[in-house]
Amino acid sequence: MTFSGFKVVKEALTGHKGWRPLWRDPDPKPAYDIVIVGGGGHGLATAFYLAQTFGELKVAVLEKGWLGSGNIGRNTTIIRSNYLLPGNEPFYEFSMKLWENLEQATNFNSMVSQRGIINLIHTDGQRDAYRRRGNAMLLAGADARLLGRDELRQMVPFLNFDNPRFPIKGGLMQARAGTARHDGVVWGYARGADQRGVDIIQNCEVTGFRIEGGAVQGVETSRGYIGAKKVGVAVAGNSSRVMAMAGMRLPIESHALQAFVSEGLKPTIPGVITFGAGHFYVSQSDKGGLVFGGDIDGYNSYAQRGNLPVVEDVIEGGMALMPMIGRARLLRAWGGVMDMSMDGSPIIDRTGIDGLYFNGGWCYGGFKATPASGYAFAHLLATDRPHETATAYRFDRFARGYVIDEKGVGAQPNLH
Ligand SMILES: Cc1cc2nc3c(=O)[nH]c(=O)nc-3n(C[C@H](O)[C@H](O)[C@H](O)COP(=O)(O)OP(=O)(O)OC[C@H]3O[C@@H](n4cnc5c(N)ncnc54)[C@H](O)[C@@H]3O)c2cc1C
């Protein structure tokens, strides 16, 4: 089943009886060439590119819940490639380019909306740092523009420019950044993978790995044993728990991150805005709700909900930046579990166990990485070599001291 204007009109006129489920609901086969653990954005994108680009045909995705129940269905949908360091920027720019073609690749409306992102500048030192970051982005083939205070004031007049403590002095803009509909991304990748023969198996929790002679043989699941020549793990906030079943300890902590949506308002915010003096970011959904978030909850947790001190902290950030937000009513809040790596950058790598591969440590920035992460993980699984944009995302960087110090804050996830 494909989507087209003709099909939408036909279904509207015939009572919407011709739509079918977007993907099959197969029983697990006894064995596959490649099993992906985790049916989030990264797992599904990996399966999609394995089938679409690398011609892998016997692939399954095992998801313990339902598709979209993890972070992919819980994030604030920001996509961007405004990083500084060589290990990161080319990867995220590769992801931006895949976003720009995603809807054509999957023939699914994922509502990719390049409405731009502005990182606000509050001090002269910050302007220098953002100028440097913008130059690094331009060198990696991304777009970046430094905005002066007057130009910015015309674009977003509702911000508190004259806040005595955090005056706004300008911004770094990436016009190609923006948002995408997070669950539309799940459904697009899932349908695309299914159409290419991937078995997507929901309600199938991986409970252990069968490892013999240092090589993985398959996975134990709540629906029985499934053999696999290769197993790729992409379980985001559950990374430490799942890899512990293979005897591995990861440089990752799990923390809750919360998101908030206000009641629907008339169009107000043109793109994504991030506060440079606190941790607060905001955009406006197509339905009109202000979508915003801030810091992770400070303690470790696997619960998909956060607590009130961080709610207060986020709202304080919002009030300092745009006091009018105090007049909006909060409609919904929720949480997801972040796989916070110790240097704030991800891992896409082989493990010490033959045939077992790992993808994780995305912290709270993995949504924007979904296409490139899937592509790079598929590349690694299919060829046993890292993709050229993901060569820095190795486990051993923590042992060797070659961490990707994107923000220079060390092993403190709450400061990333
Ligand atoms: C509130 C919030 C806001 C965010 N905002 C942004 C943002 O604006 N921009 C951005 O780039 N990123 C953002 N993120 C981060 C982003 O959502 C994540 O980094 C990314 O979604 C993680 O990858 P995933 O989609 O594969 O994870 P998930 O969707 O969590 O997928 C992992 C899947 O693995 C499954 N699983 C776990 N254990 C097992 C098991 N044993 N067996 C089988 N399956 C298992 C889980 O059920 C889950 O479905 C945000 C996250 C949150 C929570």
Image: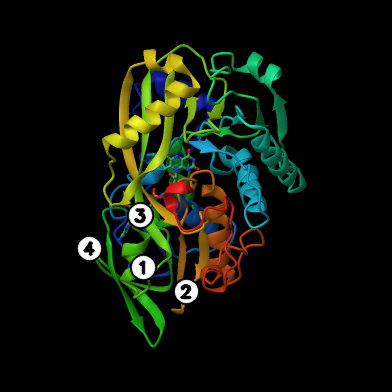
- Residue shown at the point (46%, 25%) measured from the top left: 8
Q: Is residue 401 left or right of residue 199?
A: right
Cα distance in 3D space between marks 2 and 1: 10 Å
Cα distance in 3D space between marks 3 and 1: 13 Å
- Residue shown at the point (47%, 40%) measured from the top left: 185
Q: Is residue 221 left or right of residue 386?
A: left
Cα distance in 3D space between marks 2 and 3: 20 Å
The first of marks 4 and 2 along the sequence is 4
Assign a secondary structure to mark 2: loop
Q: Is residue 264 left or right of residue 286?
A: left
Residue tagged 3: 254
- Residue toward you, 9 or 54: 54
- Residue toward you, 148 or 31: 148
Cα distance in 3D space between marks 4 and 2: 24 Å
- Residue shown at the point (46%, 79%) measured from the top left: 354
**Three-letter code, disc 1:** Met
**Three-letter code, disc 3:** Ser
Percent position (x, y) of residue 28? 31, 62
Percent position (x, y) of residue 46? 50, 56
| Label 2: how many Cα within 10 Å (few below 14, some 14–19, many 20+) | some
| Label 4: how many Cα within 10 Å (few below 14, some 14–19, many 20+) | few
The relative height of residue 416 versus residue 50 in the rendered view (above or below) is above
The first of marks 2 and 3 along the sequence is 3
Q: Residue furthest front?
A: 164
Percent position (x, y) of residue 26? 32, 55
Residue tagged 4: 222
Residue tagged 2: 351
